[in-house]
Image (cartoon, grey):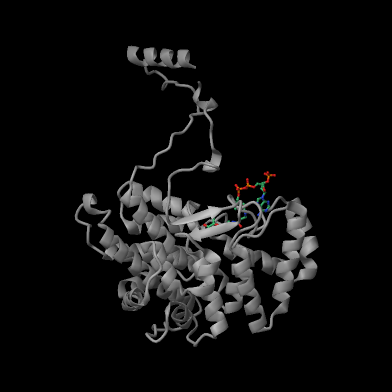
């Protein structure tokens, strides 16, 4: 069979690449389980710290385990000095995703354990759990500082009295957040935490499979998440909502956008074809924020675009559709939305990195060649072996 006749799974669509015990996405039942627990249940009952613990350890924490993780998180939640210095060197116009990617790289280069030789890079399971906790703890400070720096505001130091979600909002806005906002934010962090072999998680697993280190895998995953077909869509949703303006403009805007063959950001999914399991929970959190801030027009625009696009195309919203306007209402800058996704997804990425490392096989698929047939540089005389090999190849085809 010629290589080009091989069955190509463009975009690896439908390919089952490995097993995982971290989460299960089931488009048939429209469900998402983290280590067996439905994500809606976790979002309604658990602080994000407990969800992180679950993803890393396979079980929800008891009181003592949760307190211990919270204590470790507090030890690492201030912005490391070298990270702040590196961020300060970046132009204010740098995209926050590039800023966070750089910050994670700085944390990685500053952790010198295992840096003497590539043979030690991948680290022990204990080292990797510690690295995961440090990244998860430091990311809120990185994201919050980035937004404040762009706004010309002073850094806000973390507060020990506040748990993860409230402290994240405190460091970003410098004000005690309302319970409704903390609750919606906590839910969004849980919903974003994990989603099986999505593009960024798979990227992290590919890097891990070469026995590289956890920080390199997370940096690569951030690069994959940035694209608007993946995590960048939550930022992109707000750009389109800003373009549309209000609900009365949805129909003419959509007519134009579809005529121009534009992708409508926040809609569609590689796995879910009948709706994203996380959307109802995030939409309820968005509704609570709309009530809290008294902004019904946000809900009207959201629902008008959803109604119109679903009825024309049968393509449903994904998690980025409700989370974009939710983060906007909370007061985050649009460019900060995808970094919020990083702060959450780092838990899922690192759970997968540890899983990949524990049962590794180098990830290296095949490709079918469709370039020019063998040819030779002008004036070069092919050797007899080359000529014979070319002949065998032609016969095989
Ligand atoms: C958290 C997350 O990462 S969720 C994903 C976030 N990304 C987005 O919201 C970006 C917008 N959505 C998309 O681009 C796509 O739906 C993806 C990339 C998410 C999934 O893509 P795929 O599974 O590869 O589906 P694919 O792109 O083949 O879509 C099938 C058809 O639906 C169309 N389609 C899918 N999504 C959209 C959309 N949002 N707007 C317009 N058309 C769409 C495609 O153009 C394609 O049409 P065609 O058959 O006429 O060419
Ligand atoms: O699963 C995917 O392809 C994208 C997604 O929804 C996620 O990563 O949360």
Query: Where is residue 138 drawn, in percent x and y?
Result: 37, 72
Depth check: give the residue in front, 196 or 251: 196
301 over 230 or under it: above or below:
below
Q: Residue at x 41, y 63 (%)?
A: 55
Q: Residue at x 23, y 62 (%)?
A: 112
Identity of the residue furthest to the left in this view: 116
Q: Is residue 205 visible in this depiction of the protein? A: yes
Q: Is residue 201 left or right of residue 317?
A: left
Depth check: give the residue in front, 129 or 226: 129
Query: Where is residue 60 drawn, in percent x and y?
Result: 41, 68
The answer to which quarter of the image holds residue 306 is bottom right
Q: Is residue 320 left or right of residue 67?
A: right
Depth check: give the residue in front, 375 or 138: 138
Q: Residue at x 77, y 70 (%)?
A: 247
Q: Is residue 245 visible in this depiction of the protein? A: no
132 over 196 or under it: above or below:
below
Q: Residue at x 57, y 82 (%)?
A: 180
Q: Is residue 243 left or right of residue 369?
A: right
Q: Is residue 241 left or right of residue 216?
A: right
Query: Where is residue 162 drawn, in percent x and y?
Result: 42, 84
366 over 244 or under it: above or below:
above
Depth check: give the residue in front, 174 or 352: 352
The total number of labels drawn is: 0
Query: Where is residue 63 drawn, in percent x and y?
Result: 37, 77
């Amino acid at each position: 069979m010629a290589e080009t006749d091989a069955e190509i799974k463009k975009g690896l669509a439908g390919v089952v690449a490995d097993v995982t015990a971290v989460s299960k996405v089931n488009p048939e039942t429209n469900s998402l389980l983290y280590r067996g627990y439905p994500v809606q249940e976790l979002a309604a009952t658990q602080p994000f710290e407990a969800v992180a613990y679950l993803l890393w350890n396979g079980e929800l924490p008891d009181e003592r385990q949760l307190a211990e993780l919270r204590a470790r998180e507090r030890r690492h939640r201030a912005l490391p000095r070298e990270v702040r210095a590196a961020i300060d060197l970046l132009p204010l116009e740098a995209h926050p995703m590039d800023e966070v990617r750089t910050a994670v790289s700085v944390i990685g280069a500053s952790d010198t354990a295992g840096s003497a030789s590539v043979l030690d890079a991948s680290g022990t399971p204990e080292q990797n759990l510690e690295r995961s906790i440090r990244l998860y703890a430091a990311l809120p400070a990185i994201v919050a500082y980035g937004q404040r720096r762009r706004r010309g505001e002073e850094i806000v130091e973390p507060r020990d009295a506040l748990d993860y979600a409230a402290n994240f909002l405190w460091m970003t806005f410098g004000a005690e957040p309302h319970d409704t906002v903390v609750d919606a934010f906590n839910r969004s962090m849980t919903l974003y935490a994990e989603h099986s072999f999505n593009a960024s998680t798979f990227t992290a697993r590919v890097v891990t499979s070469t026995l590289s280190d956890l920080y390199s895998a997370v940096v690569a995953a951030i690069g994959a998440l940035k694209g608007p077909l993946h995590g960048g869509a939550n930022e992109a949703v707000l750009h389109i909502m800003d373009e549309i303006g209000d609900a009365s403009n949805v129909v003419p805007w959509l007519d134009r956008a579809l005529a121009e063959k534009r992708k409508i950001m926040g809609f569609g999914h590689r796995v879910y074809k009948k709706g994203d399991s996380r959307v109802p929970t995030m939409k309820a959190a968005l509704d609570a924020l709309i009530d809290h801030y008294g902004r019904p027009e946000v809900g009207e625009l959201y629902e008008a675009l959803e109604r119109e696009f679903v009825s024309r195309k049968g393509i449903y919203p994904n998690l980025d559709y409700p989370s974009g306007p939710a983060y906007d209402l909370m007061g985050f800058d649009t460019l900060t939305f995808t970094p919020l996704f990083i702060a959450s997804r780092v838990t899922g990425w690192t759970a997968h990195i540890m899983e990949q490392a524990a049962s590794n096989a180098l990830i290296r698929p095949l490709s079918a060649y469709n370039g020019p047939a063998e040819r030779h540089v002008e004036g070069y005389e092919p050797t007899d072996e080359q000529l014979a090999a070319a002949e065998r190849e032609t016969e095989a085809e």
